[in-house]
Image (cartoon, coloured by chain):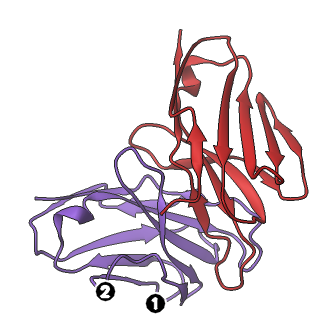
Amino acid sequence: GAGVSQSPRYKVAKRGQDVALRCDPISGHVSLFWYQQALGQGPEFLTYFQNEAQLDKSGLPSDRFFAERPEGSVSTLKIQRTQQEDSAVYLCASSLRTAHSNQPQHFGDGTRLSIL
Amino acid sequence: SQQGEEDPQALSIQEGENATMNCSYKTSINNLQWYRQNSGRGLVHLILIRSNEREKHSGRLRVTLDTSKKSSSLLITASRAADTASYFCATARDVYNQGGKLIFGQGTELSVKP
């Protein structure tokens, strides 16, 4: 079906506000990843879900970052009390299977977050 | 922090020429993947090469992997203006409960002039 969909595409927030970023993965994809991409850099891993279970959150920069995938499909990345250094593009990716790593990831177009 | 480095950081060529990008990484891997990113868009998967493979082809793309040197190269033959994009290598390790999370390099910005 359709590819990975992320919303909003652009988000501007004032420092200190909370934001929520949404990801709709490809239907049936078990694995879901969040990455953060600073300008001119490669994406950096934030967190990984297998169905509804968050199995790896080692890349989350601080406890202000929180991600969930309650029903094993749509995922939300929430950032509380935003700081200017949170400004980046947040990319979501999904892949079909679980433990096997030999498969490609399918990326959404990302949410560009700007903190003023 | 990112896994490795890509070289060159930027590459400008004429349409029809070949483009070669190199990637180095630091740890043992299960596979290495190459992705393309057009400006303002997400990443598109190009090719995956497993750690026990040395070379792989897909259309105009040729990827090599040297695990002893922890390096890979991506060759795009007969380049087109539409190949203009950033190219990233990414490595995956077969670690339990990581689902094959990708560790990216910093990317090579390719410009193909018509």
Task: Name the subunit of mark 1.
Answer: A
Kind of residue sitting beneath label 1: Pro
B109 or A89: nearer the viewer: B109
Q: Position of residue B43 (x, y in %)?
A: 53, 49
**Residue A70 has which mark?**
1
What shade has chain A been given?
Answer: purple
User: Label 2, on which residue?
Assistant: A63
Q: Residue at x 61, y 70 (%)?
A: B101
Kind of residue sitting beneath label 2: Asp
Q: Residue at x 43, y 69 (%)?
A: A23
Q: Residues within 10 Å of mark 1 (few under 14, many from 20)?
A: few
Q: Residue at x 67, y 11 (%)?
A: B16
Tag 1, which secondary structure?
A: loop
Identify whether B35 is placed above or below B112.
below
Q: Is residue A26 visible?
A: no
What shade has chain B been given?
Answer: red
Identify whether A30 is placed above or below B63.
below
Q: Position of residue A101 (x, y in %)?
A: 74, 70
Residue that lies at the very extreme toward the front in this rendered image: B69
Task: Name the subunit of mark 2.
Answer: A
Identify whether B97 is placed above or below A31.
below
A46 or A91: nearer the viewer: A46
Q: Position of residue B98 (x, y in %)?
A: 64, 79
